[in-house]
Image: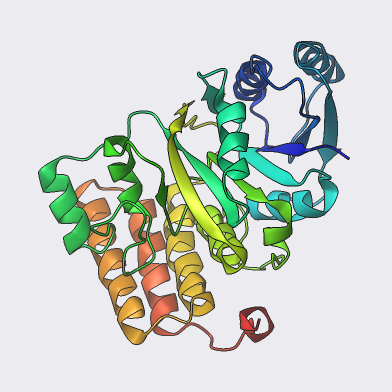
Amino acid sequence: MPDLSIVIPTRNRVSDLTRCIESIAGQVQLEDISIELLIMDDGDIPKEVLEHFTQALARMPQTELRYYRKTKPGVWLSRYEAVSLADGDILLTFDDDAELDDPLYIRRMLDTYAADPGIAGVGGVAKGLSSSPSGKLLGRLTCQMSGSPGKLSASTLAGSLLLWGETKETFETDFFHGCNMSFRRSSLRDMKPYPWMTSYAVADDIYMCHLASRYGKLLINPQLKITHHESPSSRDKAGRVARATAVNHYYLLNLRQAPLTGYAALLWTLTYLTGKSTLKRNTSAVAGYVQGILFVLNPRKNKYKEYMMD
């Protein structure tokens, strides 16, 4: 049984995935750690590319490549299915467009876990996260950010991650940045194939953090830095993402048993985002946000009641 499972969901972004895996292959000081790297594929990766990945990972001792081609697409399903497919005690997941610049990233992450058995998850920081004073004020006024780097906003948005670039010490958090995050696999035992978490699956990382936090604390270690290239390839259309922002955060509020003020905050955030998209003449996003607002106002109550129960 491996000590660590690295999971990378991907869909038709071979060049991004290649850069990611080659950067993982450059990790050092892992001679005492057995690793499996599990590719969760919603697309199609040529055989010769997989052979190249195997050759690259040969530089890492005790590392095995596993490839799983899914039958049902979606990032959330990739993460959900990976929990049962992976064998490692710790599950480390990267976006396929992430790149590890620090060859000690994994070693530092494992050392963070070793320091405290009460840790359920450890997250890292994407380089370049920042916000101006006016941006921070606007973020708080529109309920996209909180005043603390480790706290979600009232509407459960994760804009506070823009404060992470200013942090120096490890801190407790409500949420991770999905491009690089890790959990004790046992802390994800409550994950379910939520039917609303389809396609681009906005806030999937926050859902995982909410579920894992039931079993221990979550930490951000600012030393765990990556470059997140945020490739636009294969991402969903603006309208679908906008609507998913409303729907997925609505159900997240349900899962967190939030007070009515949380739903009011979400409506305020969505109203602001609608106005912002209108000014940018992004008609697709505007339509998506309007649909999302209407959903929050009339959410077809109890449609997914079974998923709201612990």
On the question of residue 189 being in view, the answer is yes
Q: Quadrant of the C terminus?
A: bottom right
Q: Quadrant of residue 57?
A: top right
Snapshot quadrant of residue 113: top right
Q: Nearer the viewer, residue 204 or 294?
A: 204
- Does residue 231 appear left or right of residue 160 in this picture? right
In the rendered image, the vertical position of residue 102 relative to residue 124, given as above or below: above
Q: Which residue is found at the position 28% from the left and 60% from the top?
A: 274
Q: Is 62 on the left or on the right of 16, as rendered?
A: right
Residue 290 % position (x, y): 35, 68
What residue is at 63 percent from the left and 53 percent from the top?
Answer: 117
Q: Is residue 234 visible?
A: no
* Residue found at the very far front of the displayed protein: 115
Horizontally, residue 30 falls left or right of residue 140, namely right
Residue at the limit of the structure toward the bottom, as seen here: 302
Q: Quadrant of the N terminus?
A: top right
* Image spot of residue 36 (x, y percent): 80, 32
Q: Nearer the viewer, residue 191 or 47?
A: 191
252 w.r.t. 198: above or below: below
